[in-house]
Image (cartoon, helix red, strand yellow):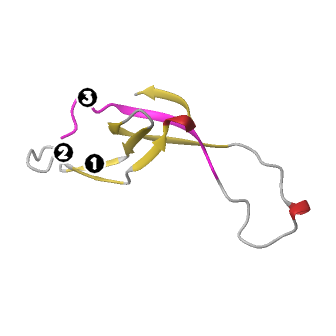
Amino acid sequence: MINKKHKLTLIEWEDSYSTDDKWKSVSAMPKPKRMICVSVGWIIKETKNNILIIPHLSDIKNKKSSGTAFGEMVIPKSSIRKRKEL
C-alpha cells in the first residue's frame, strides 16, 4: 500500500537513444547530444544502483493487494541528474 515511505518524486535523468533505424555511412552520423528525460511517480523500491518508480496507482486502500500499479520503470542511479520530492 502506498504510504508515507513511498515518496512522490520528480527525477530528471539522462537516457540512451538511437539516432536512426536504417543503415548509413559512418561519416553521416550525427553529433551525439544528451537526451534529458523527466519522470514523476512514487519510489516503490530502491537499491544501491537503481530506483523503481511508478506513475499510476489504483485500489490504494486495498490492504490485501497493497494497491495496483501501472507504468513501472527502473532508472539507473548513474543516469540521474536531479531528484526532488514533491
Mark nearer the viewer, 3 or 2: 3
Closer to the chain start, of discs 3 and 2, is 3
Residue 32 relative to residue 9: left or right: right
Residue for badge 1: 57
Name the secondary structure under disc 1.
strand
Please say if the residues under marks 1 and 2 sit with CB atoms less than 8 Å apart: yes
As drawn, the label of residue 24 is none
Q: Residues within 10 Å of mark 2 (few under 14, many from 20)?
A: some
Quarter of the figure with the C terminus: top left
Q: Is residue 13 magenta?
A: yes
The residue positioned farthest toward the bottom in the image shown: 22
**Residue kind at label 1, given as amino acid type:** Leu
> Which residues fall within the magenta stretch?
1-16
Residue in the image at 88% along x and 68% along y: 25
Closer to the chain start, of discs 1 and 3, is 3
Mark 1–mark 2 distance (CA, rounded to whole Å): 7 Å
Quarter of the figure with the N terminus: top left
Q: Residues within 10 Å of mark 1 (few under 14, many from 20)?
A: some
Query: Residue 41, percent across and down?
Result: 39, 40
Residue in the image at 38% along x and 43% along y: 52
Residue in the image at 9% along x and 44% along y: 63
Residue 18 relative to residue 68: left or right: right
Mark 3–mark 2 distance (CA, rounded to whole Å): 14 Å
Residue for badge 2: 60
Mark 1–mark 3 distance (CA, rounded to whole Å): 15 Å
Check the image and report above or below for 77 versus 32: above
Residue for badge 3: 5
Query: Residue 81, percent across and down?
Result: 58, 31
Please say if the residues under marks 3 and 2 sit with CB atoms less than 8 Å apart: no
The residue positioned farthest toward the front in the image shown: 48
**Residue kind at label 2, given as amino acid type:** Ile
